[in-house]
Image: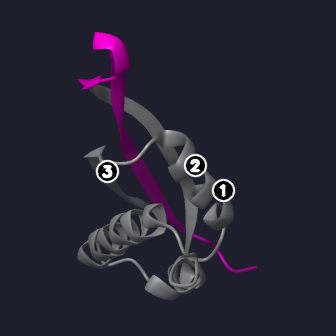
Amino acid sequence: MEARAVLRYAKASSTKLRQVLRVIGGMKAGDALYQLRFIPKKSARIVEGVLKSALANAEQKGMDLDKLYIKKAVADEGPMYKKWMPRAHGRATMLRKRTSHITIVLEEKEED
């Protein structure tokens, strides 16, 4: 059995989120939550919220929270907000505000 949480349209680029997700991939859920508190990035705060949501979903399903590990942690690209910024000599450049969709899947690890 597995539990998952999805955050769509997160206000961070997928490359910055993947740096954080690469650190916690495959970890036990409790250890990953502890590790995220010490990563000094905005992306870590966003991922921490999604992981807490996945843990709450697992608790609702009646899963054992001590046996949970992160099976899959993915950040896909979402839509871009495009704005124009005025520059010198009457020019304008496009600003791309990137968004992303985060998915975290937790699964119970069977003890041998």
Instruction: Write down the residue under mark 2.
Output: 18
State the extent of the magenta-drawn residues as a range: 83-112
Q: Residue 13 in the image: x percent, y percent?
A: 45, 42
- Within 10 Å of disc 2 (Cα), the crowding (few <14, some 14-19, many 20+) is some
- Residue 91 can be seen, yes or no: no
First in sequence: mark 2 vs mark 3: 3
Query: Label 2 amino acid?
Result: Arg
Instruction: Decide whether residue 101 is among the magenta residues.
Output: yes
Q: Secondary structure at mark 2?
A: helix
Q: Is residue 45 left or right of residue 69?
A: left
- Place of residue 75 in the rendered image (x, y in percent of width and height, measured from the top left): 48, 43
- Tag 3 secondary structure: strand
Q: Amino acid at mark 3?
A: Val
Give me the C-alpha separation between circle 2 and circle 1: 6 Å
The residue that label 3 is drawn on is 6
Query: Does 91 appear above or below 62?
Result: above
Q: Which residue does the image show at 29% across and 69% down from the upper left? A: 53
> Which quadrant would the N terminus be assigned to in this image?
bottom left
Q: CA distance from mark 2 to mark 3?
A: 15 Å
* Label 3 Cα neighbours within 10 Å, binned few <14 / some 14-19 / many ≥20: some
Q: Residue tagged by mark 1?
A: 22
